[in-house]
Amino acid sequence: MSSVIEKRSRMSSDDRRDLVLAAATSVFAEAGYHGTTTDTVARAAGVSQPYVVRMFGTKENLFITVLTRALDLVMEAFRSALASRSPETSVETALGDSYYELAQDRDVLLCLMHAFTMGSHPVIGPCARDGFLSVFEFLRTDGGMSAAEAQEFLAGGMLINTVLGLRIPDNAGVNPCAAEVTDVVLGS
């Protein structure tokens, strides 16, 4: 009688890294930087905590990697929006629509929001600041916006972040003020 041995397919190191980063993004989004441990990330990813540390070194490095990926997603969305924009669509509308679409991923949205509150952190602060300034520079150069237009666009984006982060649209059906804010900020 022969026994059948099932071989589990092994993930490539890139796939495992992506798995850990996806788990880290979710955990950081939920608990913030200070409320997250590498052990929590490891459990969420289904790997060992020493494996996470071996892969990223520190929680700080892991967060920087998550933040960099989130900022890259914003820039990719903006580049794609400009490349596919029809002549009748304004730059602001194309970029705004692409950002709103991206912001539907609450984990990415919340990781960016957490990072943008950490300006005094000696490592995360500069990374978040550089990312934000890269977006501003992109709006000015590639988007062709004036400084005032870029400022207005970013202010609107931060307002969208706040409204979505607070889940105000979830309360629009029961709270008239939430309904009005949702309509004014996000449109119907």
Image (cartoon, rainbow, N blue to C red):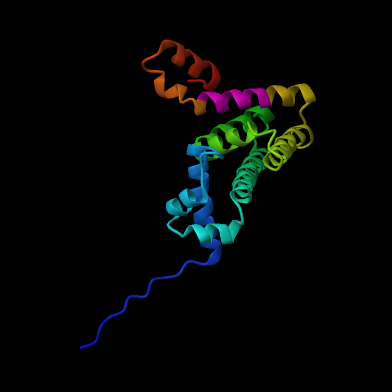
> Of helix, strand and loop, which mostly describes the magenta segment?
helix
Q: Is residue 61 left or right of residue 187?
A: right
Q: Nearer the viewer, residue 163 or 65?
A: 65
**Residue extent of the magenta highlight:** 154-163
Q: Is residue 45 left or right of residue 161?
A: left
Q: Nearer the viewer, residue 51 or 84?
A: 51
Farthest residue toward the bottom? 1
What residue is rendered at 74% in x and 23% in y?
A: 149
Q: Is residue 172 left or right of residue 123?
A: left
Query: Can you give x and y, in whole percent of width and height, for residue 112 in the image?
Result: 60, 36
Query: Can you give x and y, in whole percent of width and height, for residue 60 in the image?
Result: 62, 47
What residue is rendered at 61% in x and 30% in y?
A: 96
Q: Is residue 105 visible?
A: no
- 115 lies above or below 38: above
Q: Is residue 49 visible?
A: yes
What residue is rendered at 51% in x and 54% in y?
A: 20
Query: Can you give x and y, in whole percent of width and height, for residue 77 in the image?
Result: 62, 41
Query: Can you give x and y, in whole percent of width and height, for residue 155 in the image?
Result: 66, 23
- 99 lies above or below 148: below
Give the total of numbered labels. 0
What residue is rendered at 72% in x and 36% in y?
A: 129
Please tell me whether residue 151 belongs to the stretch shown in magenta: no
